[in-house]
Amino acid sequence: MFRPTLRSALIRDRNGRYVVFTSSLVFVACLIAGLRLDPRSMFVNLLAGLGCVALGVPIAIWVVDRYIQNATHARWARVDEMTHRAIATHLCDAMVQLLIDTPALKDFRPMPLIQEGRDKPDARTIEGLSALTAMLRDVPNPGSNDLSDAAIEYYEISKWDLDQLCDNLLTRVIEYSDEHDVIDSLAELDSVRRALHTSIIGHKLAVTGGVFENLPTLVDACGKVYALLLNHWHPTENGTTQAYSDAAK
């Protein structure tokens, strides 16, 4: 993506075309002059130049890549903990709201587990989300209109949290972080949210039902995001860094 963009920009810009034409002209002129003056030395210098280029390009790529990586890590270090906490907060708030707004669910035992990870990622939240997913999948007659109406009410209440996750925070993670697994999981969550939104539109237009059936998938997607978030969470307490990667596996 990067190279074609530079190439197309260089070719489309008039000054860029001048640079390409001038460089080509200078190269041909120097080649002809060198071959006329001293062909042997010209070939030696040409081979030496090609060797330098062949060696310099990989070294330059390696150095530039390391520099970009370090610069990205330095930028992300300023906002990583704040972003991770924000993702955890919105995920937990949306899932607790789902537990409250679903009349078919009478068991609220997952709620304390989910709330444990609201302020910072916690392994117990994954247990609560897994239990919530199982409860939603066990609800009888998930395609009923009453459950769809309840799911729509929940979505309208939690839309702000889901929008923050799939719009603002996803954009921030893409811009500053190289946590590609978290980016992929947030993008998957966005796809699930869009499917839920589409089913809501269909139900409102034609009373199709089936909105509730998207909720277990939504919780499952949130659980994946949270597990990966937990894997990247490295809180520092009293100078000691503790990783929770094993809990997320």
Image (cartoon, grey):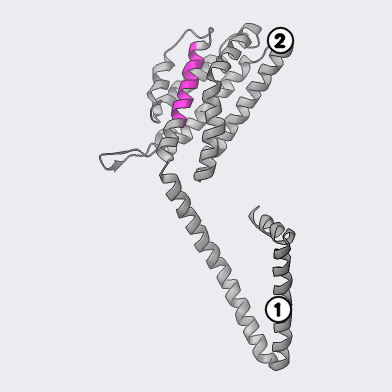
Q: What is the x, y in percent for residue 43?
A: 67, 86
- Quadrant of the rendered structure where residue 13 is? bottom right
Membership of 179 in magenta stretch: no
Which residue sits at x=74%, y=86%? 32
Q: Are marks 2 and 1 in contact (CB under 8 Å)?
A: no
Residue located farthest toward the left when viewing the structure as drawn: 238
Residue 26 tag number? 1
- The amino acid sitting under disc 1 is Val
* Secondary structure under the numbered disc 2 in the rendered image: loop
Q: Is residue 87 left or right of residue 167?
A: left
- The amino acid sitting under disc 2 is Val
Q: Is residue 77 left or right of residue 42?
A: left
Residue 207 tag number? 2
> How far apart are labels 2 and 1 at the CA level?
72 Å
Q: Nearer the viewer, residue 74 or 22?
A: 22
Instruction: Give whichever of discs 2 and 1 has the lower sequence position.
Output: 1
Q: Which residues make up the magenta segment?
A: 87-100
- Quadrant of the rendered structure where residue 236 is? top left
Q: Quadrant of the C terminus?
A: top left
